[in-house]
Image (cartoon, grey):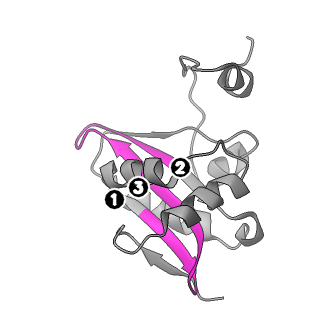
């Protein structure tokens, strides 16, 4: 299967991005919200099979010291084809000059990152914005 990677937002169908996020079980994000978020990101990649959007990944950073890889999502029917690994590798390369690069794994996806050399942090915190975030990301000690 041929996969095409693009790092521009020029021809992105934001409705497809919204549907991709739904397909992986993430909270609904409108096409308008996604366009704003991705356009504000320093680095982003979109993976396509023919005209179908099958994966995305982007960063949030300060331009020098700290960077986060966020929104790495691959459509379930295209997972295990190294698309996520490829997008992650491209983002890691873009962020190689930063002092610290971090990410938050979606629940159940930690193993994917650990296999690729990512290390679990000793202490990380979230200020939960909803009961859903509290249940999903906060663990009792």
Q: Residue 135 sits in which quadrant?
A: top right
| Label 1 sits on residue | 94
Sequence-wise, which precedes: disc 3 or disc 1?
Answer: 3
Residue 26: x and y in percent read: 67, 45
Q: Is residue 85 visible?
A: no
126 in relation to 13, above or below: above
Numbered disc 2: secondary structure: loop
Residue 81: x and y in percent read: 69, 73
- Give the extent of the magenta segment: 45-71
57 in relation to 40, above or below: below
CA gap, disc 2 and disc 3: 9 Å
Sequence-wise, which precedes: disc 1 or disc 2?
Answer: 2
> On residue 30, which mark appears?
2
Q: Which mark's residue is nearer the viewer, 1 or 2?
A: 2
| Label 3 sits on residue | 35
Does the stretch in magenta take in 51? Answer: yes
Which residue shows up at 75% across the image and 63% down it?
76
């Amino acid at each position: 299967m041929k996969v095409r990677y693009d790092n521009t937002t020029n021809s992105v169908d934001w409705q497809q991005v919204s549907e991709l996020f739904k397909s992986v079980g993430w909270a609904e994000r409108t096409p308008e919200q996604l366009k704003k978020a991705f356009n504000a990101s320093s680095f982003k990649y979109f993976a396509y099979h023919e005209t179908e959007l099958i994966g995305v990944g982007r960063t949030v950073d300060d331009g020098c010291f700290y960077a986060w890889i966020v929104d790495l999502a691959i459509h379930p029917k295209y997972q295990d084809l190294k698309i996520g690994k490829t997008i992650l590798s491209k983002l890691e390369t873009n962020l190689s000059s930063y002092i610290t690069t971090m990410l938050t794994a979606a629940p159940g996806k930690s193993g994917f990152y650990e296999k690729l050399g990512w290390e679990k942090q000793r202490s990380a915190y979230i200020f939960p914005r909803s009961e859903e975030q509290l249940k999903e990301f906060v663990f009792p000690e």
